[in-house]
Every structure is written in structure tokens, then in C-alpha cells.
Image (cartoon, rainbow, N blue to C red):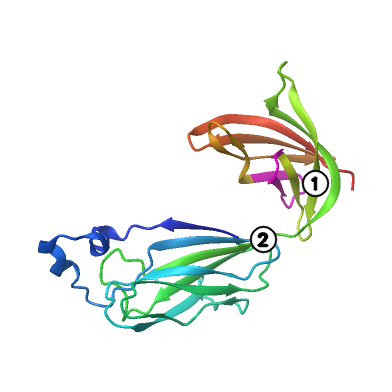
Amino acid sequence: MKVKGYLFGLGAAMMTLFASCETDNEKAIFEEANMGVAFEFAAQDVTFPAEGYEGFDVEIVRAQTSEAATVPLTATMADGSAVPAEIQVPSEVSFEAGEGRKTFHITVGDIKSGMDYNLNITVDPAYTSSFENAVTTKTITIYRDYTYSPIGTGHMVSTFFVDEAGNPAEADCEFEKADDITWYRALSPYEEGLDLVFQVQEDGKTVVVTSQPVFNDSTYGEVSVAGQGELVDGVITVSLEFTVSAGSFGAFEEVFTLPAE
């Protein structure tokens, strides 16, 4: 499981609330109207593999910590609909006396592959922070990957990697196909352990490659690719832009020949 959170600033007042040690300001800072419960992150992405998942944790904080407290939580989908039975969210979170930070667990069952579940969790207003920029509703995007089945050995030709004479590099690689949709996955085409997914669109021809890491460079670090192209007669031809955190290497034509099915 891979979890990625996006830091949402709590505003100058909230940051001061948790960090300031200035005696002159201390009294005003801690004059929180409520218990001061909030999330530090406004959004979180949780991606599960096709199999073998169970759930994830969510962190919550409070300003007033002197007493034990149980804080009610409300969960809905982002569109306002009820949370599906496959996703179980606790109705409350309990803090012990002196405890200012807590995690609660969300259980995820057999959700559909390839679908984003956008979940909103809201703190009961009676307990939330009174500061203007406090995050009192957190949005969590939950995704389950597709299952894939092996289809055999194919071939790739890369213009990003070339030999000493400048000729495109060639290599065989294993391919898999998604069980529920026409997506293909090349296994470790550039580096062992980093696969490349090709999303064939409904027209059966257009291919989209969303941003995904494909190898690690000793100088620039993680290298990702993204782009699009076409699937014609079992051959995927895509223009992929190779990027690192410092910038882009440019777009290169990569050709992947699928195994005969």
C-alpha cells in the first residue's frame, strides 16, 4: 500500500498554536474557543494493490489536551452519498488526557478495481478548532489496482536508451493484461521491479500512459514517464516524456510489441 498526504497549511494562528513558546503571546494563543480538533492534512491518497489489503490510518490533532475526550466523526462520500459497506469508518475518536495527537483506522474491503472512492471525514463542529484555516474536513481518495494475468513475452524498442552507435536499445520483456479492462502492463521494461502500465481507451486504439516511475538514475534520482500513443496490430507506439524532479529529458518514441494472444 502506498499512502501520500498533502500538507495543508493551518494558517499562522494554528502554526503558532502548536509551535510558539513566547511568554507574551502564550495566553492569547491558547485561548481556543473549542477543543481545537483538526486534521493537519486536507487530503490523502491511498492506493491498494489488487489483493492483500485491509485498511489505513488517519491522523487527527487537538489543541486542548488536559482532559480525556471522545470526538464524533461524520463520514460521507464527496458527492454527499452514503459510504459503501466495503469502507468502514469509526464514528468517533477518543483522546486520553494529555494526548494531543491520535490515529484512527479505516477498514477497506472488496472495493472495485480501477475506481476512485472519494471519502470525506468531518469533525463534529462542537469540537473543531476555531481558527479560520483549520482543516475540519479531510478528503481521502481510495483506489484499488486492477488484477493482471500474464500473456507472454513481448519486445520493446527504446529511443531514450541507445547504444554507443546511437541505435535504439531493444529488449524482450514480459507482459500482463488487466482482467477487467483493456490495460497492459510491461514488467520491468527499464528497471527491475518498476512496471509500466498502458491504458487502452474505449476506441481500442488510443493509449494513455499516466505519470509513473520507471527507473532510478544515479545522478537525478527517480525518473518518471507520461504520454500517449496508439495500439495498432498488437504494437503500442507511445511518445513518452521522461522527467525527474529537476526537469524533463524530453519526449521519446518507445515501441512495445505485445505477445500474440
- The amino acid on which the numbered mark 2 sits, given as a three-letter code, is Pro
| Left or right, residue 221 beside residue 40 | right
Whether the magenta-drawn stretch holds residue 207 is answered as yes
Q: In this view, does 182 lie above or below 246?
A: below
Q: Quadrant of the N terminus?
A: bottom right
Occupied quadrant, residue 214? top right
Which span is picked out in magenta?
190-209
Residue 29 point in image, percent of width and height: 18, 66
Occupied quadrant, residue 126? bottom left
Q: Is residue 194 above or below residue 80?
A: above
Residue 131 point in image, percent of width and height: 25, 67
Say few, some or many: other residues with alpha carbon within 10 Å of mark 2 (under 14 / 14 to 19 / 20 or more).
some
Q: Do the residues labelled 1 and 2 touch (CB within 8 Å)?
A: no
- The amino acid on which the numbered mark 1 sits, given as a three-letter code, is Phe
Q: How many marks?
A: 2
Residue depicted at x 89% and y 48%? 261
Residue 152 point in image, percent of width and height: 86, 46
Q: Camera-side residue: 112 or 90? A: 90
Report whether residue 78 is seen.
no
Q: Camera-side residue: 164 or 234? A: 164
Q: Which secondary structure, mark 2?
A: loop
Say few, some or many: other residues with alpha carbon within 10 Å of mark 1 (under 14 / 14 to 19 / 20 or more).
many
Mark number displayed over residue 142: none
From the image, tell me which residue sits under label 2: 49
Residue depicted at x 75% and y 57%? 181
Distance (Cα) linking label 1 and label 2: 18 Å
Mark number displayed over residue 175: 1
Mark 1 vs 2, N-terminal side: 2
| Left or right, residue 207 beside residue 131 | right
